[in-house]
Image (spheres, rainbow, N blue to C red):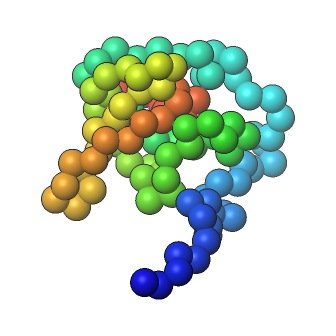
């Protein structure tokens, strides 16, 4: 077997960085936002919150909320031809109209 190099946050220096204008405290309304089952959401990670941060491959992808699991949401995303379920905190999700 080959030894695995790195962690889940490897090569994310640019994608998990806030711009100068966005730095500061996190919006409480975004932290506690709620979604209904069937809502379309986009994965937009908040670098300041590390809990339930989605994998870097799914940044910018859109999906559908399938269920609530604790304080997080299960989002179904199409990755190529496969459907994948991502568990993400609501601070990392943005509603899509």
- Place residue 86 in its image quadrant: top left
* Depth order, front residue of 77/70: 70
- Decide: is 41 above or below 81: above
**Quarter holding the N terminus?**
bottom left
Residue 63 shows in this picture: no
- Decide: is 77 above or below 51: below
Residue plotted at (48% across, 25% down): 72
Q: Position of residue 68 (x, y in %)?
A: 38, 20
Q: Position of residue 24 (x, y in %)?
A: 83, 35
* Depth order, front residue of 3/50: 3
Left or right: 36 as drawn, with respect to 55: left
Left or right: 48 as drawn, with respect to 40: right
Residue plotted at (56% across, 43% down): 53
Left or right: 8 as drawn, with respect to 16: left
Q: Position of residue 66 (x, y in %)?
A: 27, 27
**Quarter holding the C terminus?**
top left
Q: Position of residue 33 (x, y in %)?
A: 53, 17
* Depth order, front residue of 72/64: 72
- Decide: is 40 above or below 35: below
Residue plotted at (48% across, 35% down): 88
Residue 74 shows in this picture: yes
């Amino acid at each position: 077997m080959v030894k695995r190099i790195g962690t889940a946050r490897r090569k994310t220096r640019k994608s998990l960085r806030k711009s100068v204008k966005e730095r500061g405290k996190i919006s409480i309304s975004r932290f506690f936002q709620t979604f209904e089952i069937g809502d379309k959401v986009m994965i937009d990670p908040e670098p300041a919150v590390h809990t339930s941060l989605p994998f870097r491959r799914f940044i910018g992808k859109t999906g559908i909320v399938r269920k609530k699991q604790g304080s997080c949401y299960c989002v179904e995303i199409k990755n190529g031809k496969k459907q994948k379920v991502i568990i993400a905190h609501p601070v990392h999700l943005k509603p899509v109209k």
